[in-house]
Amino acid sequence: MTGRQPFSDLELIMRRHGARPAAPRALDAAATATLAEWDRQDAALAALYGPIAAEPLPATMRAALGRAAHEDAAPRAAWPPRARIAAAFVLVALGAAGGWGAARLLPSGGFAPPAAAFAAIRAHQTFVGEVTHPVEVKADQAEHLTRWLSKRLGHAINAPDFAAFGFVLMGGRILPAEPGTAAVFMYENATGQRITLYAAPGDGSSETAFRFVEAGATQGFWWVDSGLRYAVVGEVPREALRSLATAAWEQLT
């Protein structure tokens, strides 16, 4: 006897945003749980980023979105109608949940990124351009920085060494997270390019594989390990960012 075919993410996204399936069927327990989890994530994002959604779009972000729209125009025009509709649903859902900062945050492989991935992108975009106060505690106070972030995070953590990739630790800071507190390490290379490592308490997820997310020119790889959610974020080529994330995972494991 053949069991019921599980609902795909596309089917659930379309149902969630009012699209009527050609052959409707009742939701099963797994689909209901997935939709409930998406509701929980939306609520967390709304709580974290509600005020941000009302802010005017920065000029740098407008320019990045304009470039992305221009670059994506040709491939997007070639998509079949159903794929374009599905993509629109995804963008609407992400935009409504996280404001402009997450409007172009897209998952790879059909996996919806968790709230921590949105938060990591937003934290990077907020502080990477800071000149006077990019970090709260500088790298020359490394011992204090490690103790402070570990205590506030509730988990021992050391800043990974990215010197082999040309990035040197600048320092770190703490940020509110859902749940608890997040730690952010910032790094810079000789040309002034910066990347960040974001770490926040886990939410019970067992997803350990690297997942890619992007928001305009900002890209990131996130993963879950030992009760923490991590993300390496920057405006660097995707494969270089993957190498940095792999190095972070090896040192943090």
Image (cartoon, grey):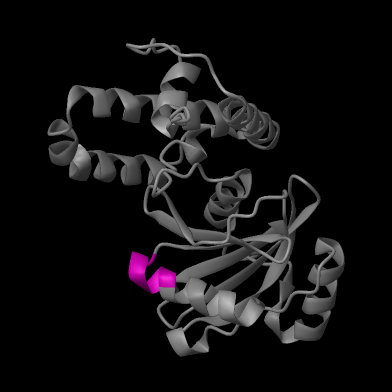
The residue located at (62%, 82%) in the rendering is: 251
Which residue is at 80% across, 85% downward?
Answer: 143
- Say if 206 sits above or below 179 in the image: below
Q: Is residue 227 above or below residue 100?
A: below
Q: Seen in the image, is 137 located left or right of residue 35?
A: right
Q: Measured along the vertical axis of the image, is residue 162 above or below residue 48?
A: below
Question: Does the magenta-highlighted stretch encompass residue 48?
Answer: no
Instruction: Please report the residue visible at 71 percent of the width from the left and 57 percent of the height from the top.
Output: 200
Q: Nearer the viewer, residue 66 or 98?
A: 98
* Residue 209 image point, x, y percent: 51, 61
Whether residue 74 can be seen here: yes
Q: Does residue 129 show up?
A: no
Is 217 placed above or below 23 here? Answer: below
Image quadrant where residue 131 sits = bottom right
Residue extending farthest front:
1
The magenta span reads 236-242
What percent of the width, then of the height, locates residue 124? 55, 57
How far from the left and from the top, in percent, is residue 44?
Answer: 69, 35
Image coordinates for residue 99, horizontal then vertical, percent: 53, 32
Query: Which quarter of the rendering shows the N terminus?
Result: top left
